Image (spheres, rainbow, N blue to C red):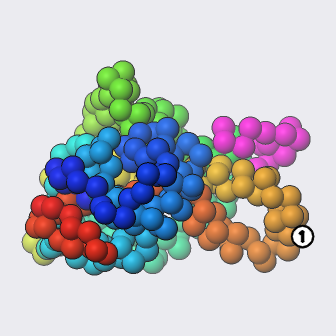
Amino acid sequence: MGFDVGPDPRLPSNVDSFAPPIDFLAGAFYLDGARAAYRWLRDNAPVYYDENSRLWGVANYAGVLAVERDAATFSNARGSRPDTGPLPWMIDLDGVAHATRRKLVSAGFTPRRVRDTLPRLRAICDELIDAVAERGECDFVADLASPLPMAVIGDMLGVATADRAKLLAWSKQMLVSLGGTPDDYAIAAEAFGAYVEYARGMIADRRTNPVDDLFSVLVHAEADGVRLRDDEIVFESLLLLIGGDETTRQVSAGGLEQLLLDPKQLSAVRKDPALVPSAVEEMLRWVSPIKNMARTTTAAVALQGTTIPA
C-alpha cells in the first residue's frame, strides 16, 4: 500500500457504493490485517481517495511499483508519514541526499560486519530458547519475539545489556503515536525525548572512544565529503532501533500466529526444517509489518486512469 498526500476531495470514478470502511491512518483499520479492504481496493479502486484521511491510496502492485520508480513525482522529502513533516533521517530524503545518507549508514552493514554478527545472533537465540525450554511453556512475544530483535540491534548499536529494557520500552512508546490521540502523542514525545538524551550521550562517548559498533560507525563515517550531524545520527540510530525491533517482533509473532491457525502448515514445517526459509518468506509477505508508505506528489499525475493532484 502506498500513500500520496493530496488535497483534492474527488473520488475516482470506479468507486462503487459497496466499498468497505476505509481509513488509511486509523490503527483500527489494520487490526484484522485489512485484507478484505485491500482485496476490494485491488478489484475496484486501486487508486482510491480516502476522505477520512484526505490522501490517496495506491493498492495494487503495478501502481505501487510505478510510484516507487518515480521519485521526481512521488517525493519522500516532504515526510515519510502523511500526518508529519520531514525528519532528518534517510527515509525522508530524495536523490543525491538520500544516496549520500545511505552510503554513510550502510558503512555499518558491510558483508564482513554482518557475517561477524551471526555467531552472537545464534548464541542469543540459544539463550532465549534454553530459558523457555526449561519451563516447558512461554509467552512467545514476551519471552522470544520482543527480546530477540532488541538484543541483536542493541548489540550492533553498542547498547549496554542493562539498557535494552528501556530502549525496548521507548521503541514501543514511540510507536504508540500511530494511534493518533493526544495521549498517544504525549507518551511518544516523552519516550522520544528520553531516547534523544540517551543517544547524545552515546554519540559523545563514541566520538572520543570509538569501538566496533554502529554508533561509532555513524559518528565517524564520511561519504562524498559529508559527515553526519549529531541530530542526524540520533534519527538514523532511532530508525535502526525501531526498524530492527518492531518489524522483526511483528513478523515473528504474526507469523507464528498464522502457523497456529493452520495446523497442516505447522505440521509440515515441524516435519521438514528445510521448509523454514520459505515459511519465513511467506510470513514476511502475509504478515507484512510495513503496512504502507507515504509519498507526496510534486505535480499532478495520471495513475491507472485516475489523476492524483499535486
Residue in front for this viewpoint, 26 or 284? 26
Give the farthest residue toward the front: 17
Residue in front for this viewpoint, 218 or 146? 146
The location of residue 263, given as percent across then percent down, is 86, 58
Q: Is residue 144 above or below residue 62?
A: above
Question: Circle 1 sits in a helix, a strand or a loop, which is it?
Answer: helix
Residue in front for this viewpoint, 307 or 234? 307
| Magenta region, residue range | 129-142
Residue at (10% x, 67% y) in the render:
299
Q: Quadrant of residue 78?
A: bottom left
Q: Is residue 302 above or below residue 154?
A: below
Q: Is residue 76 above or below residue 303?
A: above
| Image quarter of the C terminus | bottom left
Residue at (85% x, 74% y) in the render:
272
The location of residue 62, given as percent across then percent down, is 39, 78
Residue at (81% x, 58% y) in the render:
262
The location of residue 165, given as percent across then percent down, is 52, 34
Residue in front for this viewpoint, 67 or 122? 67
Q: Amino acid at mark 1?
A: Lys
